[in-house]
């Protein structure tokens, strides 16, 4: 039944996307070029509706039974409405944040999903206590925005989200979490159908309608799959979402260094930096796909590793991320502390 449902979701998404494209032009939900945008033509931008409609069809067909289902669907509806209104009317950042908080609160307060504790690597537990609710909400809102921030090139957010969904569903399958597998694959099939029109050169954008929904559903699935187990399990979703999380983190660092508001837009995200390095639009997207796949592979290895190996793996990945970030200028051209330290060390070693 699941395989048939996935095929249905894929084809619904393929059929619905051209219809959503016509609707976008009809109601004026379009994205116009400006100095921050890469595209040069007016583009329809509510393609995420096709993903959501396909997703709902899949949920209706398979009806996965779980205590969190109602809360997740209610939150999904809120986040879709928030994204759709933003694509249509360009909401203020505060209104968008309220919509995201409302969707997160559905899962936390209606569904009861909370990260209460983690088992530490060398024994004992870290109890979050009264912080469990705000930390859970912060995770959902943070990942929702992280996916939204990388939605800057044709097919980028859809492809990175698909890779994350494959990884989350794969690890959930290994752990026997059938609900996460089913929902994750339904979202994946719906996203791949849309990606058929969204890959470069795209004929439609997912807009905030799609990016906020994908970020929301990925954040919730990652919590459902890996909450309240061990330090290793707690880190797995962070690794899976390494591309959007690191891009968001370096954007925050970059704005602090430049003394800019955290919400200030710029053209120094990962895809912008790679385009400036001379990579084509398609090459940039494919390279970021490769990075996302690398993080997914690391997450799978990490999930099967022992404590010592896992900690070493974390250290290697963190150093690798920092080196790449400094190489391509994610924190600014002049902010390269690790590379400067390595260069100084090499120079002194050669002198001696």
Image (cartoon, rainbow, N blue to C red):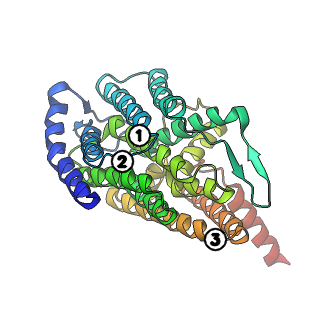
Q: Which residue is mark 3?
A: 305
- 64 or 283, which is in the foreground? 64
Image quadrant containing the N terminus: bottom left
State which tag comes first along the sequence, 3 or 2. Answer: 2
State which tag comes first along the sequence, 1 or 3. Answer: 1
Image quadrant containing the C terminus: bottom right
Q: Do tag 3 and tag 2 residues touch (Cβ < 8 Å)?
A: no
- On the image, the x and y values in percent for residue 306 come to 68, 71
Q: CA distance from mark 1 to mark 3?
A: 31 Å
The image quadrant that residue 213 belongs to is: top left
- How many residues crowd mark 1 within 10 Å: few (<14), some (14–19), many (20+)? some
Residue at 37% from the left image edge and 27% from the top image edge: 82
- On the image, the x and y values in percent for residue 339 come to 68, 62
Q: Is residue 143 visible?
A: yes
- How many residues crowd mark 3 within 10 Å: few (<14), some (14–19), many (20+)? some
- 15 or 36, which is in the foreground? 15
**Farthest residue toward the right?**
352
On screen, residue 54 above or below 288 = above
Residue at 42% from the left image edge and 32% from the top image edge: 75
Q: Secondary structure at mark 1?
A: helix
The image quadrant that residue 313 belongs to is: bottom right
Q: Secondary structure at mark 2?
A: loop
Q: Which residue is mark 2?
A: 64
Residue at 69% from the left image edge and 64% from the top image edge: 315
- On the image, the x and y values in percent for residue 253 come to 63, 42
Q: CA distance from mark 3 to mark 2?
A: 31 Å
Q: Which residue is mark 1?
A: 69
Q: Do tag 2 and tag 1 residues touch (Cβ < 8 Å)?
A: yes
Q: CA distance from mark 2 to mark 1?
A: 8 Å
Q: Is residue 155 visible?
A: no
């Amino acid at each position: 039944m699941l395989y048939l449902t996935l095929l249905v979701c894929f084809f619904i998404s393929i059929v619905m996307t051209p219809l959503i494209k016509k609707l976008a032009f009809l109601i004026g939900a379009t994205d116009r070029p400006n100095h921050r945008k890469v595209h040069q033509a007016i583009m329809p931008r509510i393609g995420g509706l096709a993903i959501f409609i396909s997703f709902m069809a899949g949920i209706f067909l398979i009806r996965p039974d779980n205590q969190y289902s109602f809360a997740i669907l209610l939150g999904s509806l809120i986040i879709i409405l928030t994204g759709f209104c933003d694509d249509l009317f360009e909401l203020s950042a505060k209104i968008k944040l309220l919509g995201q908080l409302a969707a997160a609160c559905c899962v936390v307060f209606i569904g009861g999903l909370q990260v209460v504790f983690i088992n530490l690597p060398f024994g004992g537990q870290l109890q979050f206590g009264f912080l469990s609710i705000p930390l859970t909400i912060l995770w959902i809102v943070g990942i929702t925005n992280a996916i939204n921030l990388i939605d800057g090139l044709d097919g980028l957010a859809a492809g990175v989200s698909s890779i994350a969904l494959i990884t989350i569903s794969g690890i959930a399958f290994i752990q026997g979490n059938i609900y996460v597998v089913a929902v994750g694959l339904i979202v994946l099939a719906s996203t791949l159908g849309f990606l058929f029109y969204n890959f470069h050169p795209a004929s439609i954008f997912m807009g905030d309608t799609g990016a906020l929904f994908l970020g929301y559903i990925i954040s919730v699935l990652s919590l459902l799959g890996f909450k309240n187990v061990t330090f290793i399990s707690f880190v797995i979703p962070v690794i899976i979402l390494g591309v959007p999380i690191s891009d968001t983190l370096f954007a925050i660092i970059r704005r602090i260094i430049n003394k800019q508001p955290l919400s200030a837009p710029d053209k120094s995200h990962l895809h912008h930096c790679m385009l400036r390095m001379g990579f084509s639009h398609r090459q940039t997207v494919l390279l970021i796909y490769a990075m996302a796949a690398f993080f997914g592979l690391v997450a799978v290895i990490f999930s099967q590793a022992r404590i010592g190996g896992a900690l070493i793996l974390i250290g290697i990945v963190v150093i690798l991320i920092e080196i790449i970030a400094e190489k391509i200028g994610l924190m600014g051209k002049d902010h390269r502390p690790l590379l400067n330290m390595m260069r100084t060390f090499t120079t002194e070693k050669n002198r001696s």
